[in-house]
Image (spheres, rainbow, N blue to C red):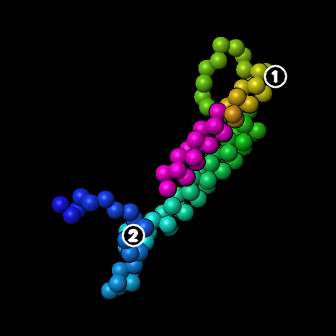
């Protein structure tokens, strides 16, 4: 029944006393840092890739159907603005979840 007692990772040792290697509790700060950096890197990559695709190919970020001709101005600009807002919102939610999770 001792295994069912509650604990916090901060109370556990971060290194093994005999070998000096990191324990599971010792890896948590590294995992937190690298996960947040990976999330930011993915968001930056997506932004750069989408921007290049929009500028060079005159495409949208998401494949969607609109009941109007969106390839002419000003509809194209409005569609791009709406998709950018959606992307920012989605990436913001993902980043917040990653930060809160860790």
What is the secondary structure assignment of the residue under circle 2?
helix
- Relative to 69, is 49 above or below? below
The residue shown at (76%, 38%) is 55
Q: Quadrant of residue 86?
A: top right
Q: Residue at x 49, y 66 (%)?
A: 29
**Distance between mark 2 and mark 1 Cα atoms:** 60 Å
Where in the figure is residue 22, as x and y percent of width and height?
Answer: 40, 76
**Mark carried by residue 11:** 2
Mark sitting on residue 9:
none
Q: Is 95 part of what is drawn in magenta? A: yes
- Answer above or below: position of 21 versus 91: below
The residue under label 1 is 73
Question: Where does residue 62 sit, x and y in percent of width and height?
Answer: 61, 31
Q: Which image quarter holds the N terminus?
A: bottom left
Is residue 57 left or right of 40 when viewed as pictured? right
Q: Which residues are magenta?
A: 86-102
Horizontal arrangement in the rendering, residue 1 relative to residue 85 (left or right): left
Q: Residues within 10 Å of mark 2 (few under 14, many from 20)?
A: few
Q: Is residue 67 above or below residue 11?
A: above
Q: Is residue 54 visible?
A: yes
Residue 34, position as x, y percentages in the image: 53, 62
Residue 89 percent coordinates (x, y): 63, 37
Is residue 43 one of those drawn in magenta? no
Front disc: 2 or 1: 2
Of helix, strand and loop, which one carries label 1? loop
Q: Is residue 14 left or right of residue 3?
A: right
């Amino acid at each position: 029944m001792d295994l069912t007692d509650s604990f916090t990772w901060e109370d556990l040792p971060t290194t093994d006393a005999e070998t000096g290697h990191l324990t599971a509790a010792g890896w948590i700060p590294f995992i937190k840092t690298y996960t947040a950096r990976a999330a930011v890197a993915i968001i930056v990559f997506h932004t750069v890739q989408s921007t290049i695709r929009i500028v060079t190919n005159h495409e949208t970020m998401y494949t969607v159907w609109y009941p109007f001709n969106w390839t002419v101005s000003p509809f194209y600009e409005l569609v791009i603005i709406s998709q950018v807002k959606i992307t920012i919102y989605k990436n913001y939610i993902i980043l917040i979840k990653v930060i809160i999770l860790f």
